Image (cartoon, rainbow, N blue to C red):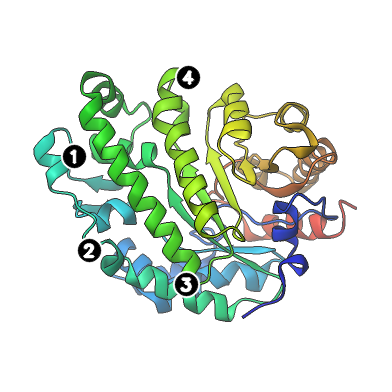
Amino acid sequence: MGSSVIEKPLLAALSGRRVSPPPVWLMRQAGRYLPEYRAVRARARDFLELCYTPDLAVEVTLQPLRRFPLDAAILFSDILVVPHALGAELRFVEGEGPRLEPVFDRAGLARLGAERLHERLGPVYETVRRLRRALPDRVTLIGFAGAPWTLAAYLVEGRGSKEFLRPRVLARRDSALFGALVDLLTESVIEFLSAQVVAGAEALQLFDSWAGVLPESELRRWCLEPARRIVATLRARHPEVPILVFPRGVGACLRLFATEVGAQGLSLDTGVPMAWAAAELGGPSGPTLQGNLDPVALLGPEDRLLEEARAILLAAASRPHIFNLGHGVLPETPPERVAALTRYLKSGGE
């Protein structure tokens, strides 16, 4: 089933230890930049079928580990499987992203329900079980979910957006309705992540990809409080499983997530100076910091890429640290750049 916690670099870092060299994995490390991923993707009717077919999801999760010396595998899935399991109509349009039937009133909320949540997400749990058996001993299996605000934003907007005006307006005009939606999503995310742990996930990440569109007062209500509730419940149920939170784009409000949420790890987006984060976010006893190389650096010259990676290593040297990107690997990324980066990191930055 795998080695002990202390032998896994990523889990050691999340326990508050400084690991040298720091563990590394990359958000969206499995994906379109790999030709072998594109070959598997072509075998599925659509993206959801890829997520819900354990044979295929396991294969694409493992692909980057065969190429690169990574310390973690993150379950291949999508954050929108939770609203889909709640009964939301969902499809992915090639080149445009997700489309959902918008929820903007009580009738829309009434269409959603958690009665068949685990039944519908059963294939995801099966993928987790198979991955745990297949992974090398030193590699940590990360499960994940979207955070309630981000999921609610997609549900109300009906699609991706740069501003997510509809959910932001609804949250102010009818906070009771929006709060009921967030409560449903919060409980569903707890159950989804807990089931992933039972299936074999060794660490969890909560993605709040669109937290950055909210001001502090709204951020506290719709992002911080649900995250705290999710983390507290999961830590009570599964005290051995560390949790990372990724509130993308919140800037100085990261202090709130570092001090009030209770997660063992805090993932930083590209816009956060690592030196500032290392100095300001909780001190030596604060959460393990994860990040935060600009994914675009992987598209540029190799020498510049390694310079940027070294700067992050130096800035984070005083804290437990997991090397990652500030967002996901871009589809245009040459695999050779990922290989160069991971070789450099595993050599201790030499």
Q: Looking at the picture, which amino acid does disc 4 mark?
A: Glu
Residue displayed at 24% across by 36% down: 180
Amino acid type of the residue that numbered disc 3 sits on in the rendered structure? Ala
The residue indicated by pointer 3 is: 199
Label number found at residue 102: 1
Measured from the top left, where is residue 234 in percent x and y? 50, 53
Q: Which residue is label 2 attached to?
A: 116
- Could one spot residue 221 in this view of the protein? yes
Q: Is residue 227 above or below residue 56?
A: above
Give the Cα distance between marks 3 and 2: 18 Å
Dot 3 crowding, Cα within 10 Å, few <14, some 14–19, many 20+: some
Return the residue nearer the eye: 294 or 134.
134
Q: Find residue 216 and name its label.
A: 4
Q: CA distance from mark 3 to mark 4?
A: 36 Å
In which quarter of the view is residue 154 placed? top left
Dots 3 and 2: beta carbons under 8 Å? no
Along the polypeptide, which appears first: circle 3 or circle 4? Answer: 3
Q: Quadrant of residue 118?
A: bottom left
Classify mark 3: helix, strand or loop.
Answer: helix
Q: Is residue 159 visible?
A: no
Q: Amino acid at mark 2?
A: Arg
Q: Earlier in the sequence, mark 3 or mark 2?
A: 2
Pinpoint residue 49: horizontal percent, then vertical percent.
Answer: 31, 68
Mark 1: amino acid: Pro
Q: Is residue 47 above or below residue 282?
A: below
